[in-house]
Amino acid sequence: MSSETSSPSGEKKISRTAGAGFTADLKSNSILLGAVILLILPLTFILGDFGEKRTTQVLVLGLPLLLTGFLNFRIALLLFLGSLFIDINPVYLFSLSFLVIPYLLLVFVVTNKGFETRDLKSPFLWVTVFFVLTMIPSFFNSLAKTAGGFNMFMWPGFILLFSLFAVVFKDEGKINFLAKAYLWLVSLNALFAIYQGITTGRRAFGFAGIMFVDILGIAIIMVFILLLHAKGKEKAGYAVLFAILILAMIFNKTRNVWVNVALVMFLSFIHVAIQAGSLQMERRKVVKYGVIALLFVALTGGLLISFYGTTFFRLEEKQKLSAESLEVADVNNSLVTRYFIWSTGYTAFAQNPFFGMGMYSFAYSSKFYNGLPDNIYKKFVSGLTLHHGYYSMLVETGIVGFTGLLIFLFVLFRNGRKIYREASGTPRFLQAFIAFWAMIYIFTSLMFTDAWFWGRGIVMFGIVLGVLSAIDNMNKSNPAKGTK
């Protein structure tokens, strides 16, 4: 049996022996990796005395794992996905997962000879560049130019990520690998979060931290659509997974995510029913199983609330505000605490309506716009972002940046819709359809959080656009029958 195949250009490509070669390389390096790990362990705890200990431990212990990524890109991809579940922001608003993006590019270059940077292209590139340009004038007014300017480097990384993924995922199988790995990691953390919720009674995020609520939200939308599409035993498997994820979402006790997931599930359900023919599904069955799934969500939530009580799920926070409670900053109502942040943001916007107060500047310079008592400001506003995606863009970048955001989201919506439509009649249509709805989840989530512009949120955003970009490239290289 031949171990090589020839491409149309005459170049030879390794095929059958790739897996065997990978295994041999892994075995030959296992002793070296073991020695590195043994050396790293004591070094980690020594370095832990300098700076934040958990961050140092993760970074140093992760080094040997990062080295294994150079043996096979899929290992590097798994490490990247794993970093999404580590709640660490090493510097400013950068997450650990963001810092892994350059590593991904380096591994891809090393493991894919012949790759050129001009291959990095995406239908979302120029509108993202335009959006970034509309943010830049805000720095004329920024009182935190260093911190805000440094955080702006997240946008080149964002562009790099979705452009890289457009090249990495050359076929449906690679996208399936990404989706399966993501759902496995979400499922493990969901089970742990359920355990935490039952045993502690507190809000449960597993080992992934609070951003898990939106990582989980996207997974629920993915599994919901897959559940409607699946048949036979596969449908039963997705039903069990769906139930686990919903339980984890309830124990997260994050009400804005409940609203967001419910809204996107309902809208995607209608869309799936409309697109049943293109998805090769029976509309009658789509409606049947969709209604069952939605009823399951409602009944499960209702039963758990009746069992544990409304206070367990933070549904009774009707707190009477008094002069005394405000004086000592004894306020727990989440809407009221957000009001303190938003009122400070309004003051900043009123002073800088056209260009804003500076992108990524609110968390560092809100004190200059504060009109609240010092104790209230320190407890509820100081060091925090604006907790609302659209509002934060309006406050920090003004009317100019907010207009750029609306154009950016409109073009993303239009191009995403075009991509899944052009994939109709191909195996990648379902993938494009799910990625489109993951993007819609982010758009609606911006009404509740600004975390999609920083940390792990912007990384998740880049992954979704990267999958859509990859499918767009597949559409162009292998169009569906009947399209040009």
Image (cartoon, rainbow, N blue to C red):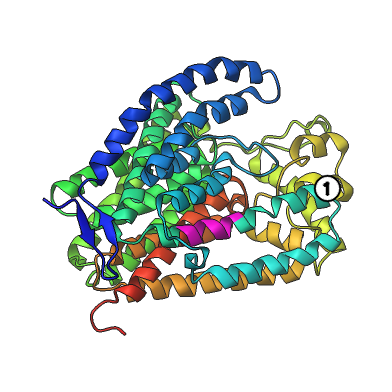
The residue wearing badge 1 is: 365
Relative height, residue 453 to residue 181 (above, below): below
Question: In front here: 409 or 35?
Answer: 35
Question: In front here: 166 or 260?
Answer: 166
The region drawn magenta spans: 157-164
Question: Identity of the amino acid at label 1?
Answer: Ser
Residue at 21% across, 59% down: 5
50 drawn magenta: no
Q: Quadrant of the C terminus?
A: bottom left
Question: In front here: 194 or 177?
Answer: 177
Q: In the figure, residue 192 lies in which quadrant?
A: top left
User: Which element is circle 1 on?
Assistant: helix
Asked whether, in this view, residue 305 is left or right of residue 255, the answer is left
Relative height, residue 227 to residue 126 (above, below): above
Residue at 39% across, 48% down: 219
Q: Can you see residue 249?
A: no
Residue at 13% across, 50% down: 232
